[in-house]
Amino acid sequence: MEKPVTIGIVGGGIAGLCAALEAREHGADVTLFEAMQHLGGRAGGGKTWETGRHLATSAYTDFLWLLDQLGTRQHLVMKPLALGVLLEKGRPFWHFQHPTLGPLATVTSLLGSDLLPFGTRTESLFSMLRAVKLAAPEPDDDDLAGDATQPFVTIPEGNIQELFETTRWPKEFQRRIGRPLARSIFNLSHLDTASAPFLVVLKRTMSANPKEAGWSIGNPGALLSDAAPGKLKEKGVQVYLRTLVSEIIPRDGKWFVKAGETEQAFDRIILTAPFNRLGMLATCEPLQHLTDATAMGKVEGGTIVTCRARYNHLDVEPGPMAELSDEDPAWFAESHPEGGVQLERIVSGLDSSVTVDREAMKREFLDLTRKYFTSDDPVGDVEIRPYIHATPSLKPGLRRPRLLQAEGFYYASDWSATGLPATMESAARAGRVAGRHAAKQ
């Protein structure tokens, strides 16, 4: 009888959790190392989402698979989703008010909106119809893992270098389907690469059944961090929390993970740490192109700043909204657990070397809130939270790295080449693909 493949997973975020559970399903012997005191990474550990409201829709199949594995899907509140664009004091115009109506609700709401010119409404409608009909094949798992011969490759065309100059939609995307106006459903970056990932997610969203969209308004710790240790133990995964890995060393046909003064040997390694954490690892050859890309400035860690405040009442539907007056910001509104509405403005893509002026951002947040929503003063103070190096982004001309970096060495994160935008779903998919491949004999 063959011994099971031994796999060491470095990082216990969404990608790491998915990799561990998938690899165990395929019979591997799995050990997971996490530097923090909780599992779930950036998406877990707290009572609110720490880096903004990632949408979790019925199109997020791998992320929802993770919640099913952890037995926590019931904690994800799937509210009907309202998408919109802030136009002066206008309300959101685009609604999924019934989770089973899907595109029909979108069409009805869009055509019935009085906030946009008729030509704009019809243009958006035809764009959505084209998107439904347009082929958007998702990459095969074997294609995603690749053969590790070209982990970083140049893209001859299709770079999106000026994404936010005129619109939140990639120019190539507009060329193919027109200009839809529900803009903040995707986690876009002006340095992202190619329009195909956005089309894949749009196709998923339009074709998913049931038509559900929403976000967790409860405790993300209950979704991920609280349940994960017990579930991983139940499935036979060895977990080391508060364990910082300092080296990943190939030697004598094995991979050695060094944490503190101890080393453990594995047949395969799955690294799920984000780009900006790679500098903490001693360089080995399979890591070289990743660390080189970071050192050469090809991979950057931008800063995200969230501005949050609670209001007794705002005349706004719950959900995400794009802000047309600036390049980057997006807004979220949701019910506050203590009553009223929590409003959040997210500013992303800031250079990590820039010092965040909290008072200036607070003043801007209050001024814009009064302008857009005609609101009273918030209940309590405005909370300003900067997240340094929160979202790595690639310089134009680079693809995301392949999952397979070398024989037995996998890099799996939301910035791996998954065919999806960098979201929780992308992290979940990368982890499952890596776990499945690594567990093969």
Image: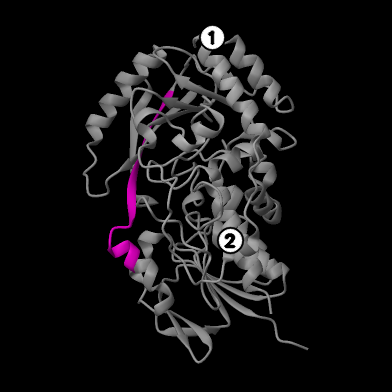
- Up the image or down, 225 lies above or below 84; here it is below
Residue at the far top: name it: 114
Quick one: 120 or 108, which is closer to the camera? 120
User: What crowding class fits label 1: few (fewer than 14 Cα within 10 Å), some (14-19), or many (20 or more)?
Assistant: some
User: Which three-letter amino acid code belongs to the residue tagged 2?
Assistant: Leu
Give the mark nearer the N terminus: 2 vs 1.
1
The image shows residue 338 at horizontal and vertical percentages of 51, 28
Dot 1 corresponds to which residue?
Answer: 118
Q: Is there any visible trace of residue 230 in the rendered image?
A: no
Residue found 22% across the figure and 49% down from its top: 353
Image quadrant where residue 129 sits: top right
Q: Is there any visible trace of residue 357 in the rendered image?
A: yes
Task: Give the magenta range.
Answer: 292-310
Which quarter of the figure is the C terminus placed in?
A: bottom right
Residue found 49% across the figure and 23% down from its top: 341
Residue found 51% across the figure and 18% down from its top: 92
Residue at the far front: name it: 156
Does dot 2 land on a helix, a strand or a loop? helix
Dot 2 corresponds to which residue?
Answer: 144
Q: Residue 245 colored magenta?
A: no
Q: CA distance from mark 2 to mark 1?
A: 42 Å
The image shows residue 407 at horizontal and vertical percentages of 54, 78
